[in-house]
Amino acid sequence: MAQEENEPPVGLLAEEEIAAFIQHAGELEHPREMIIDLLRAIQNNRGWVPDAGVELTAAILGLTALEVEEVATFYDKIYRRPVGRYPIHICDSICCWSRGGEEIANHLLQKLGIEMGQTSSDGLFTLLPSCCLGGCGRAPGLMIGRQFHGQLTIERVDELIEQLRQEDCA
């Protein structure tokens, strides 16, 4: 059955989730404030937010796709293209860089055999730069998924990568 022109795209969220978001949006004076919540829900289900996810978010909130896209592309933790199972955000702020962040980043690039923005051949890791992760007191730091790791050494980074590889095999 063809989708009606004004119906939101399906398959990105469960029908119950869509209904809950629609209800909640109807209760808010400014439904726009739910953009990130919706994009994250889609990303949690798909691993990233395809164009259809932007369209679904727009339809639920009564916005244009452009209004949603502006928000989606502003936040570097919303992925608009596929990423590895474990996205790694490497903080490249002056605080982290002055405490060894550059060496950590270079080590990861070499260890995983990829450049920034690329995904490892096993599909597990995507390296992404981030201007600040808010962990300056624990610099150098990086974020794997939504988990911040600070006061890093090359040895600790190697442990984290191996731990994630083992978890993936389990």
Image: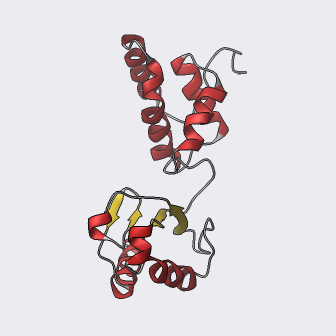
The answer to whether any part of residue 131 appears in the image is yes
Q: Relative to 123, say whether 77 is above or below.
A: above
The N terminus is located in which quarter? top right
**Image colouring:** secondary structure
The answer to whether any part of residue 165 appears in the image is no
Q: Determine whether, in the image, residue 111 is placed left or right of residue 161.
A: right
Where in the figure is residue 36, as x and y percent of width and height?
Answer: 46, 35
Where in the figure is residue 96, as x and y percent of width and height?
Answer: 40, 71
Q: Relative to 36, say whether 95 is above or below.
A: below
Q: Determine whether, in the image, residue 90 is placed left or right of residue 9.
A: left
Which residue is at a point 52% across and 69% down the rendered structure image? 125
Frontmost residue, 1 versus 77: 77
Count all numbered tags in the image, as a single digit: 0
Q: Determine whether, in the image, residue 79 is placed left or right of residue 132.
A: right
Which residue is at a point 57% across and 85% down the rendered structure image? 110
Frontmost residue, 111 versus 1: 111
Q: Relative to 45, say whether 97 is above or below.
A: below
Where in the figure is residue 45, as x and y percent of width and height?
Answer: 48, 44
Q: Determine whether, in the image, residue 74 is placed left or right of residue 136.
A: right
Which residue is at a point 53% across and 82% down the rendered structure image? 106
- The quarter holding residue 140 reads bottom left
- The quarter holding residue 157 reads bottom left
Q: Relative to 12, say whether 15 is above or below.
A: above
Outermost residue on the left side: it is: 137
Frontmost residue, 60 versus 104: 104
Outermost residue on the bottom side: it is: 155
Where in the figure is residue 138, as x and y percent of width and height?
Answer: 27, 69
The C terminus is located in which quarter? bottom left
